[in-house]
Image (cartoon, rainbow, N blue to C red):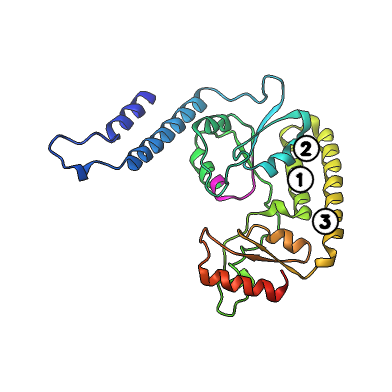
Amino acid sequence: MLHAAGEMLLQNAPRPPSPGRGALDIPPATAVAGHWSNSLMILLLLIIAVAGCTQNPPDRTDDGRLPVFAGIQPTAYLVEQVGGARVAVDVLVRQGQDPHTFEPTPRQVSDLSGARLFFKIGLPFEDVLLAKMRDGAPRLKIVDVAADVPKRTMDAPCCDHDAGHNHDHAEHGGPPDPHVWLSPPLLKTQAKNVAAALVAADPDHAEEYRENLAALLERIEAVHRRIERKLAPYRGRSFIVFHPGFGYFADAYGLRELAIESGGRSPTPKQIHALIAMAQAEGA
């Protein structure tokens, strides 16, 4: 099967132009690179699928830990704190990478296929990747740590409206806001979901996971109370951010987020001028 897959990819790979073709017929380098990137990903997923039919990935790492993956660092932190020494946590989006533009490496896809659990937060790249891996990693259990977190929609850019005000984006049917890890109260819900998944996957150490969860919830609550005291004098005030990622944080502490951009669109000079005027008027 793998030999046939390789033959298929080679037959469909881009070939250099014949001597009679004009220079304008040469495929762009980016198109060739993109083709090979897609082809390699398809071949890797085929290899994973065939391997999954012949052998099952181990339930534990060599040192006896439960192999798990998280989509982003904040989720990985929760898993590490609850799982402790019982889990081996790997993360897809590493420090310095942007989850909005992230693409996994072939090595990460291969490693993920051998994990027992994948903790997702609801970012688009997670759903795209998992849809591609559905057949190649049948034993991988998906855990949506934000499944029961009340969702808000992304705030519109603060200068997008004729009236110059940042209306509630829910009125306009904006995209869902995935930044749920930036609210300490909601972070506690996510930690509980992590613990429930680890207990189900590894019931022999359920009590240890529950104890770790209790300690983590105490720390999160302490941070929440400290932030609450610090921001109490500013309740009802606005703050300006470039990317609208702090909506849940603002909701938790009675603040109002004013975003400069949304959906990757940079503000125009007119919008920047309006933003300055708004900031001066609101004292942001």
Q: Specify start and end residues of the magenta stretch as a single range.
A: 119-126
Disc 1 marks a residue whose amino acid type is Ala
Label placed on residue 191: 1
Residue 166 visible, this angle: no
Q: Are the residues flagged by discs 1 and 2 in contact, CB closer than 8 Å?
A: yes
Q: Earlier in the sequence, mark 3 or mark 2?
A: 2
User: Is 125 included in the stretch rendered in magenta?
Assistant: yes
Q: Which residue is mark 3?
A: 227
Q: Residue at point 78% right, 66% down?
A: 254
Residue 11 on image: x %, y %:
27, 31
Q: Quadrant of residue 73?
A: top right
Q: Secondary structure at mark 3?
A: helix
Q: Nearer the viewer, residue 14 or 173?
A: 14
Q: Closer to us: mark 1 or mark 2? A: 2
Q: Residue at x 53, y 44 (%)?
A: 102
Q: Which mark is residue 234?
A: none
